[in-house]
Image (cartoon, rainbow, N blue to C red):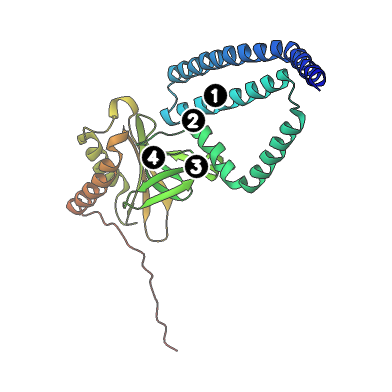
Amino acid sequence: MDNLSTENLQALMNQGLELAMLYLPKLLLAIVTLIAGFWIIGKIVKGTEKVLQARKVEATLERFLSSLISVGLKVMLIISVASMVGIETTSFVAVLGAAGLAIGLALQGSLSNFAGGVLILFFKPFKVGDVVDAQGYVGVIKEIQIFNTIVTTLDNERVIIPNGVLSNGPIKNLFAEPTRRVDMTYGISYEDNVQTAKEVIRNLILADKRLLEEEYGHEIYVSEHADSSVNLLVRVWCNSPDYWGVYFDMHEQVKLAFDEQGITIPYPQRDVHMKSA
């Protein structure tokens, strides 16, 4: 009985030694690969962060992309190390792929918004503080998130726009350029003198220091013979922050100047002729 136990113990020791000789080098190589892999991944993530910072990418997108690269590379490293040790990874990868496909189909809308947010943060069609006209809303960009963009309209309503539709639709960045052209239309009566009205408007333009007269000049045209008025199209240029001030002030000053000169701003009217039977 003692001899049998000794033989069994010897057999187990021999089997253990064989397994150790077989798997110990693989295990040591896997450990070294794992340590070196984590070190290399750290260098790659830091290099990515420096590149993103050099390109002045938004901090939100920078952190997200760094985390995404880090997690993705670490998952690939762990799968590779497991394969080196001898663990079958084919079925594991297949399960991950199937799970990823199912999650992608379930979150199709959210993934579209996520992709839109990445594009917006990376390409920067607008930034926080810009005034935009998008998806039927005009307002100030307050926050750009991964899935949504928050806009405060000019009457102080808070609008949350999904990034998917925002990145795939037209966007007007109203004050992205340093200067803007202000287009205005003023109607005068058919009985009034067109040249007098144009001279009144021209004097107001030359008196407004906010207008970029030397760089761009101005334009005053007869644009339309309307039903009740002769319409004058006025085009002037100003710095973007002065746009609304120029627009509203010009309307007020033109009305006051027309009143002083006796120029009529007509309103829609109709002449009715009565005929007796």
CB within 8 Å, label 4 to label 2: no
Residue 74 coordinates in the image, percent (x, y)? 59, 23
The residue positioned farthest toward the bottom in the image shown: 277
Where in the figure is residue 46, as x and y percent of width and height?
48, 16
The residue carrying mark 3 is 147
The disc, 3 or 1, on the residue closer to the chain's N-terminal end is: 1
Amino acid found under the numbered disc labelled 4: Glu
Q: What label sits on residue 143 in the rendered view?
A: 4
Q: Nearer the viewer, residue 69 or 243?
A: 69
Point out residue 254 in the picture as x, y percentages from the top left corner: 24, 48
Q: Which residue is mark 2?
A: 64
Type of amino acid under label 2:
Phe
- Between marks 1 and 2 in the image, the one whose residue lies nearer the viewer: 1
What is the CA distance from the residue labelled 3 to the residue labelled 4? 11 Å
User: Which amino acid is tagged 1?
Assistant: Ser
Residue at the left extreme of this rendering: 260
- Label 2: few (<14), some or many (≥20) within 10 Å? few
Residue 70 tag number: 1
